[in-house]
Image (cartoon, rainbow, N blue to C red):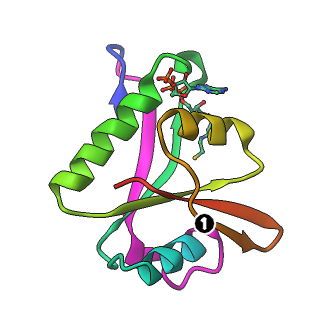
């Protein structure tokens, strides 16, 4: 979480263990099972959802958040994955700008999810 001087939250991400989601029927579950099939462990990390407050978007806060959490995952010797909804073109563009490209695409219901390996 990144807070401003006034104490308000400017940017935040939910981090969880993949094992939390392994039975879940929706996108987090599909992502966790995909990562586990790729050799991740239940203790490895799921990144997201994440958001930056509207007033502070476009100032590099998300880049800072992603870089800080990625460094933390590597220091803890954890892999980290995330999913993006392929309909969210802005999110795809932002992640591409950060050097993160979707590896596999999973179909979950009517959604297409891009799998991101972050650490
Ligand atoms: C997506 C979101 C997290 C980005 O946060 P942000 O703080 O505005 O992003 P940053 O300013 O750190 O930008 C990161 C990179 O993406 C690029 N970028 C930002 N908006 C972009 C856009 N609309 N199109 C293309 N690239 C864009 C930036 O140029 C930057 O790259 P650079 O450092 O090489 O210049 C923010 O807009 C948001 O909270 N959106 C609503 C929730 C959401 O969609 N979350 C993502 C899915 S979980």
Q: Is residue 83 above or below residue 95?
A: below
Q: Is residue 34 left or right of residue 26?
A: left
Residue 87 visible in rendering: yes
Q: Where is residue 40 in the image (x, y as percent from the top left)?
A: 35, 75
* Quarter of the image with the N terminus in it: top left
Any atom of ligand 1 within 8 Å of the CB at mark 1? no
Q: Position of residue 81 (x, y in %)?
A: 44, 61
* In front of the other: 106 or 54: 106
Residue 9 visible in rendering: no
Counting labels gives: 1
* In front of the other: 63 or 54: 63
Q: In this view, does 32 lie above or below 91?
A: below
Question: Is label 1 in a helix, a strand or a loop?
Answer: loop
Q: Give the range drawn in magenta.
A: 7-28
At x 42%, y 80%, the residue is 36
Q: Where is residue 37 in the image (x, y as percent from the top left)?
A: 46, 83
At x 42%, y 30%, the residue is 63
At x 56%, y 61%, the residue is 103
* Pointer 1 local density, CA inside 10 Å: few below 14, some 14–19, many at least 20: few
At x 51%, y 80%, the residue is 33
* Quarter of the image with the C terminus in it: bottom left
Q: In this view, does 82 lie above or below 97?
A: below
Q: Where is residue 7 in the image (x, y as percent from the top left)?
A: 35, 21
Outermost right residue: 110
Q: In this view, does 3 lie above or below 109?
A: above
Q: For ligand 1, give the image quadrant.
A: top right
Residue on which disc 1 sits: 104
Outermost left residue: 75
């Amino acid at each position: 979480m990144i807070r401003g001087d006034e104490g308000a939250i400017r940017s935040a991400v939910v981090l969880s263990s993949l094992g939390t989601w392994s039975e879940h029927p929706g996108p987090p579950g599909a992502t966790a099972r995909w990562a586990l099939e790729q050799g991740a462990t239940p203790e490895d990390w799921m990144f997201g959802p994440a958001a930056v407050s509207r007033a502070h978007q476009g100032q590099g806060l998300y880049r800072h958040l992603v870089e800080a959490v990625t460094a933390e995952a590597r220091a803890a010797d954890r892999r980290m994955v995330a999913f993006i909804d392929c309909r969210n073109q802005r999110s795809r563009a932002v992640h591409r700008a950060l050097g993160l490209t979707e590896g596999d695409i999973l179909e979950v219901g009517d959604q297409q999810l891009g799998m991101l390996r972050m650490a």
